[in-house]
Image: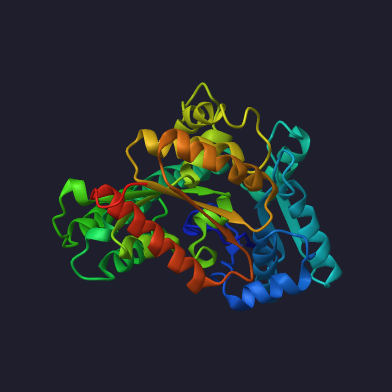
Amino acid sequence: MKVAFPYMGTVVVYKKLLELLGHEVVVPPRPSQKTIDLGVKYSPEFACFPFKVIMGSYIEACEMGVDTIVTSGGHGPCRAGFYGEIHKRILHRMGYDVDVIIFDAINRDKDRFIENVKKVKGKNSWFKLAKAIKFTYDLLQQIDIFDKEVHRIKPYEEIPGTVDKAWQEIQKEFDLAYDKKQLKKAVDRSREIINSIRLKKVDEREKIRIGIVGEIFVVMEPSINMEIEKVLGELGCEVERSQYLSEWVDFNLMPSFLKKTHEEEVLKKGEKYIEIIIGGHAKQTVGFIVDFKDRGFDGVIHLMPFACLPELVSQSIIPKISKEHDIPVLTLSIDEQTGKANNLTRIEAFIDLIRNKKLGKFVV
């Protein structure tokens, strides 16, 4: 199969698993204005921003000759549960002869899930499939450690841009790994890269830590969220997201008796505000705001696609959470018409507020 996937976050992980199964992998271009324009043109107007960006990304992949797209489904009231099927119908209507393999949760339709696994497995043995999944899982765990690390140290780099360059090099190191020995080499080399970065010494009392919460696609994909982690790093803030792919896998795909995840604790923290799963990551959003406060973060930025139904519920509750837990929260709504300059001004003002509050010069 000549196969592609949705572009979101650290794409080397998806690429690696499909390559290990012997497929010809086409990595779609990083979402650009062309991607957004294509997505907006061929998507229903009411669809949310992630749908449109992914639509554009699929069209670009089809133009590169892919015959198969592998993606995940959704569950709950969120419209995302229908998006894979709608993407497929639009592509077929446009004349692209492409198979879209949609992985929903296994307990939703076990037979279909297994049928999809067999399609992706191809002629490989079940043993080879398990080995490829295990290796990719190990790689994913390691690369997310460095993903967190680079955004923790970014505000303290002596030479601007050093950490961004290091993160690009680290991803290339992991892209070269195809077995356990090469993975260890990638980890060691990445640690060397991190340790070689010269950092300024900053008093602990002056450090600012910001959590990012919200819908998974806008939280994880820098090309559509104004590269908010980089922006915050340049403003002197350590950043941690609510969503990392390894944690999503642990919570959604790993049997609970094998691994206790932090997300379970987060959901309990959010139950006071949203009792049940209402689709998307709304419950995680409110839970993570409480969690970031409990872990000593100074503020939270909430990212949501414009008119995202679950995140609109979260947004309505956030003022109450912010007041009860004494943590400032800034909500940014993102779509194809987002004014980047306007949002950057709001982010700068938000960080100034937090910095002044922390220095005791301003009382909220």
| In the depicted structure, whether residue 21 falls above or below residue 270 | below
**Where is residue 62 drawn, in percent x and y?**
70, 71
Colour scheme shown: rainbow
Nearest to the observer: residue 241 or residue 21: 241
**Where is residue 337 drawn, in percent x and y?**
63, 71
Find the residue positioned furthest to the top.
Answer: 257
Can residue 123 be seen here? The reply is no
Instruction: Tell whether 198 sits left or right of 187.
Output: left
| In the depicted structure, whether residue 210 falls above or below residue 15 | above
Find the residue positioned furthest to the bottom.
Answer: 34
Which residue is at 25% across, 57% downward? 189
Can residue 243 be seen here? The reply is yes
**Where is residue 314 drawn, in percent x and y?**
60, 42
| In the depicted structure, whether residue 286 falls above or below residue 363 | above
Instruction: Tell whether 78 sits left or right of 153.
Output: right
- Quadrant that contains the N terminus: bottom right
